[in-house]
């Protein structure tokens, strides 16, 4: 372990760490609150940057609270439980702003509103539980490691998922497949689905209503973890968009494909997960929507093959994974010259990287909003609306 330092936390940075300065160096402190006076232990040094952890809170920040979860600090799942909820939202607005200024190189970033979650606890409808057969432990990875933190009660899980976690933990270890390393679990309105299926746990098909649309999915397909905010997010992402042709890239089970199909004459959805595309087609069919076509393909591969032959596209919505959109996808979108783009992102850093390319390609930002799909963590969903300016 390294030296001990006394620091004051200035603000929260992307990644959720607190920023401080000491002895002419920048200090990143995990699990800090802005305004904290702390004694920290330096764990590693990289150039002029020190990475540290809290040893003692000397003077707590006015926005610091006692984390209610007994696993906080060891479990790698939540890193904002030490902040009031208002401070969490402010920190996330700051994280988005930081990434847009520093990575996207925006001179003027509009004031960011992060829409609060109706539930701050017991909101997650989806989780991945890690399994350590040797130690007979089930939970989440410990912070900064691949060791499993054995979690009996997760305070952010929907009650139905918490009950399922308890049932999984009560299952005899002899019933677990020998090669099982993790379980994906998701809850709908009618049931819970686990993947892979084992013992009495099945990969059930689920239903969930979001606004006026009903979606079917299971644990083998992605669905957002906090449905309560989704109607608001969808409304912002689509705004007043309508026209002849829309693309829905990384479309999943059709969260945006269905409402887009009610606004555009033709919609093409592209998704690499074959289970998700099967559900997307079924969701469209059950909604009586026949003007959308969902393809099973990587978005990058589809763009390489089709970006010049798609015809006129009015609107592109993309909702990529945390790694953001591949360079060929951004290039393909620019080649299509849509009048409007809606970028839904779960990582402000990769969003900033991709926005820089889109702005250089002739687009201007119309509006930005954050949505707190992930209370108690530094993660935030951001939606940016862009309009062709050239």
Image (spheres, rainbow, N blue to C red):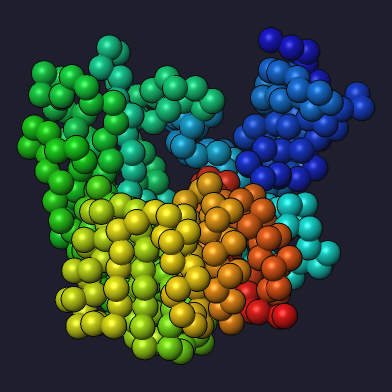
Q: Report the side of 20 relative to 68 (left or right).
A: right
Tell me how many marks there are. 0
Query: In percent of the image, x 69 and y 10: which residue is there?
Result: 1
Residue 306 picture quarter = bottom left
Q: Is residue 277 above or below residue 198?
A: below
Inspect this view and state whether residue 227 appears. no
In the image, 365 versus 84, the foreground residue is 365
Locate residue 384, reporting x and y percent: 60, 69
Query: In percent of the image, x 19 and y 37: which residue is there?
Result: 196
Q: Report the side of 302 relative to 101 (left or right).
A: left
In the image, 151 versus 92, the foreground residue is 92
In the image, 303 versus 193, the foreground residue is 303
Query: In percent of the image, x 20 and y 83: which residue is there?
Result: 288
Q: Report the side of 279 relative to 309 (left or right).
A: left
Of all residues shown, which one is farthest toward the left?
A: 200
Locate residue 303, reporting x and y percent: 47, 61
Q: Is residue 135 above or below residue 364?
A: above
Residue 165 picture quarter = top left
In the image, 81 versus 370, the foreground residue is 370
Q: Report the side of 117 relative to 204 (left or right).
A: right
Query: In percent of the image, x 63 and y 41: which residue is there?
Result: 15
Of all residues shown, which one is farthest toward the right?
A: 24
Inspect this view and state whether residue 71 appears. yes
The quadrant of the image that shows the C terminus is bottom right
Q: Is residue 260 above or below residue 128?
A: below
């Amino acid at each position: 372990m390294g030296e001990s330092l006394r620091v004051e936390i200035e603000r929260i940075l992307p990644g959720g760490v607190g920023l401080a300065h000491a002895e002419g160096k920048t200090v990143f402190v995990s699990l800090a609150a802005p305004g904290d006076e702390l004694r920290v232990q330096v764990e590693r040094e990289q150039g002029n940057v020190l990475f540290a952890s809290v040893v003692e809170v000397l003077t707590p920040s006015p926005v610091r609270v006692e984390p209610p979860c007994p696993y906080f600090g060891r479990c790698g799942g939540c890193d904002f439980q030490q902040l009031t909820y208002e401070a969490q939202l402010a920190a996330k607005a700051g994280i988005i702003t930081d990434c847009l200024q520093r990575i996207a190189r925006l001179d003027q970033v509009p004031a960011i509103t992060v829409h609060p979650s109706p539930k701050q606890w017991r909101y997650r409808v989806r989780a991945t539980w890690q399994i350590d057969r040797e130690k007979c432990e089930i939970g989440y990875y410990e912070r900064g490691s691949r060791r499993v933190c054995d979690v009996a009660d997760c305070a952010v899980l929907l009650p139905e998922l918490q009950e399922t976690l308890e049932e999984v933990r009560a299952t005899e270890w002899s019933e677990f497949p020998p090669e099982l390393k993790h379980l994906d679990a998701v809850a709908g309105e009618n049931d819970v689905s686990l993947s892979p299926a084992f013992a009495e746990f099945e990969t059930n098909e689920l239903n969930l209503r979001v606004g006026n649309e009903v979606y079917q999915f299971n644990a083998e397909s992605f669905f957002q973890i906090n449905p309560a905010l989704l109607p608001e997010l969808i409304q912002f992402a689509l705004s007043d968009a309508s026209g002849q042709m829309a693309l829905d890239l990384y479309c999943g089970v059709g969260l945006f494909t269905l409402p887009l199909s009610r606004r555009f004459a033709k919609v093409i959805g592209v998704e690499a997960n074959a289970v998700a595309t099967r559900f997307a087609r079924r969701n469209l069919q059950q909604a009586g929507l026949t003007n959308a076509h969902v393809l099973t393909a990587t978005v990058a591969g589809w763009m390489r093959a089709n970006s010049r032959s798609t015809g006129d596209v009015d609107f592109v919505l993309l909702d990529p994974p945390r790694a953001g959109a591949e360079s060929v996808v951004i290039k393909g979108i620019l080649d299509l010259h849509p009048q409007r783009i809606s970028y839904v992102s779960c990582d402000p850093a990769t969003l900033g990287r991709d926005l820089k390319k889109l702005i250089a390609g002739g687009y201007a930002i119309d509006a930005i909003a954050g949505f707190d799909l992930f209370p108690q963590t530094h993660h935030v969903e951001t939606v940016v609306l862009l309009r062709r300016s050239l």
